Amino acid sequence: MDILLIAGLWLDGSAWDDVVPELTSLGHRPVPLTLPGQGDGAASATLEDQLATVLAAVDAASGKPLVVGHSAASSLAWLAADARPEKVAKAVLIGGFPAADGQPYADHFAIEDGVMPFPGWAPFEGPDSADLDQETRDRFASAAIPVPEGVARGIVHLTDERRFDVPVVIVCPEFTPTQAKKWIATGESPDLARATHLEYANLDSGHWPMTTHPQALAHTLAQTTNP
């Protein structure tokens, strides 16, 4: 199966470098995406530009692909399900819930000179970053790509209720499936509360399992390809 891999904020397609070989060995065709404004130097990129890149990959896939969104990019995976409900096999959300219709994509941190730079590790202390050693933190921070304002503050538009019939798998790294279920039940994600096929996969890691547990993540993703 084609597996489209969309990394979260500050990352490009290389974030999946250690996941790709394992997925390939398991018989799948991983396709890491580098999004406009996150790896191609287009600081003026918008959320619409990023979604267009994702949809082009969905349309180019062989058969129905698995669309994987990490963190904030969970919204991009869900937007793909909304725009192509008949073409997306499953939406897999790693460590994140999709933004609601009419809400900003990822307006979480300060905008400076038209971009949202990596804010340092203070906001991520605790379970998010507990499995990152100092060398990995330094490497991540030095390579982090500032996210264009037009992406971070882009408004999510969801239009096709057929998206609720697209199967969803929530991969739970720094939180548990029990916590995720509770958050959804209490209104954290109105869209996921309406999903008709919702599964959970536990993964013992921090927020960036593609870095700290790439093989375990690859096997988790491979398991989600099962009907």
Image (tube, helix red, strand yellow):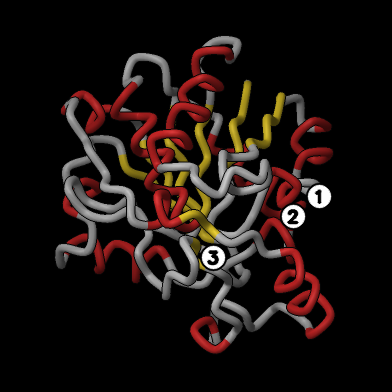
Is 123 placed left or right of 203 in the picture? left
Question: In x, y percent, where is residue 39?
Answer: 67, 46
> What's the CA distance linking mark 2 and mark 1?
6 Å
Q: Residue at x 49, y 45 (%)?
A: 44
Of residues 138 and 209, the one drawn nearer to the viewer in this rendering: 138
Q: Residue at x 40, y 50 (%)?
A: 150
Asked whether the viewer can see residue 219, the reply is no
Local secondary structure at mark 1: loop
Mark drawn on residue 214: 2
Q: Residues within 10 Å of mark 2 (few under 14, many from 20)?
A: many
Local secondary structure at mark 3: loop
- The first of marks 2 and 3 along the sequence is 3
Asked whether the viewer can see residue 133, the reply is yes
Question: In x, y percent, where is residue 106?
Answer: 38, 59
Residue that label 3 marks: 173
Residue that label 1 marks: 18
Q: Mark 2 touching mark 3, by CB under 8 A?
A: no
Question: In x, y percent, where is residue 137?
Answer: 74, 78
Q: Count the labels in the image.
A: 3
- The first of marks 1 and 3 along the sequence is 1
Q: Amino acid at mark 1?
A: Asp
